[in-house]
Image (cartoon, grey):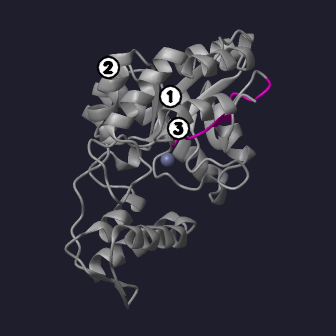
Amino acid sequence: MHKLLQLAGKLLGRGKLSILIYHQVLAEPDPMRPSEPTAAVFDWQMRLLRDYFTPLSLDDALHHLQHDTLPANAVCVTFDDGYLNNLTVAQPILAKYGIPATVYIATGFSHGNNMWNDRVIHLFADKNRQQLSLQGQKVELADWPQRRELTQQWLMKLKYLPIKPRLTEVDKLYQENEAAEQAPLMMNPAQIKQLAASGICIGAHTINHPILKVLPATEQQFEIIQSKQQLEQWAEQPVKHFAYPNGVFGRDFDDTAVDIVQKAGFDSAVTTDWGISTSHNSVFKLKRFTPWDKVSLKFHLRLIKQHF
Ligand SMILES: [Zn+2]
């Protein structure tokens, strides 16, 4: 069956580039993050890419895209945010199968502080708590599905607040519950350097991971350019690729950001808009998608279906 799908991909997939988005690859399953792949799942996914697809580095893929010479079943692997498990769990698996990848890093989280969403998840995940105080209201915590549901509600509630009030709200939730912060989940500068030295391409993803669209152009420029320069210093290599935080064109960023990215000297930028890219797409608005399937045939089918 995989062979048949590979053939279908060869017939239909010419000139089309699939870019996969990952965030974390978990060493062990995490009941609060059921959609993140574990090492075991990521391992067969990468083996499948090696066996039936043509994994390319982003640089090679862009070159082929611009010259309309993409091989069939072309695929790029990308990670957003800069999680430490990209280095400790994903990188050895990528190396084992010889698969190139790009990791887009938000530099403001490289000194021990976790991203606001992970801080919220950590609060609701504490098995020692049967209840939380949320803005003065006592809320009962029960099983994992209920905790996940509540977490999602609070993430949605906080997501589109400006950064400062959002962080203040998360800080308040921690204070209200006398909660302790989780150990750092993101890579520090030395770990970023180590990842770069292993051959993984480092891309920029702003400093504070803001919704760019709601910021004035000068602040967008600061977020985009400073993260590039900081990463170039840490990784000791040019940083040529960018990922828009949250990444939906029109909702999370607009032409102001696209223009800044282009002028800042990046070669490409990826969105989270769902789909494949062809030579007709702007390289500053490349589409991506998340292969969430935990069954190998479904995963394969989904990759091929993108080409229809
Ligand atoms: Zn992100």
Q: Is residue 56 visible?
A: no
Is residue 282 a member of the stretch shown in magenta? yes
**Can residue 300 be seen here?**
yes
| Image coordinates for residue 19, horizontal then vertical, percent | 59, 30
Disc ID at residue 21: 3
Question: Counting residues from the N terminus, which is met first, the one under dot 2 or under dot 3?
Answer: 3
The residue at which mark 1 appears reads as 77
Within 10 Å of the Cα at label 3, are there few (<14), some (14-19), or many (20+) other Cα atoms?
many
Rate crowding at label 1 as few (under 14), some (14 to 19) or many (20 or more) other CA atoms within 10 Å.
many
Q: Secondary structure at mark 3?
A: strand
Which mark, by number, is residue 198?
Answer: 2
Left/right placement of residue 127 relative to residue 274 reads left
User: CB atoms at circles 1 and 3 under 8 Å apart?
Assistant: no
Question: Separation of disc 2 and disc 1 at Cα?
Answer: 15 Å
Q: Secondary structure at mark 1?
A: strand
**Range drawn in magenta:** 280-292
Q: Amino acid at mark 2?
A: Ser
Residue 198 coordinates in the image, percent (x, y) = 32, 19
Q: Which quarter of the rendered picture does the C terminus lie within?
A: top right
- Residue 219 lies left or right of residue 9; in this view the side is left
User: Which quadrant of the structure image shows residue 84?
Assistant: top left
Q: Earlier in the sequence, mark 2 or mark 1?
A: 1
- x, y (%) of residue 202? 44, 28
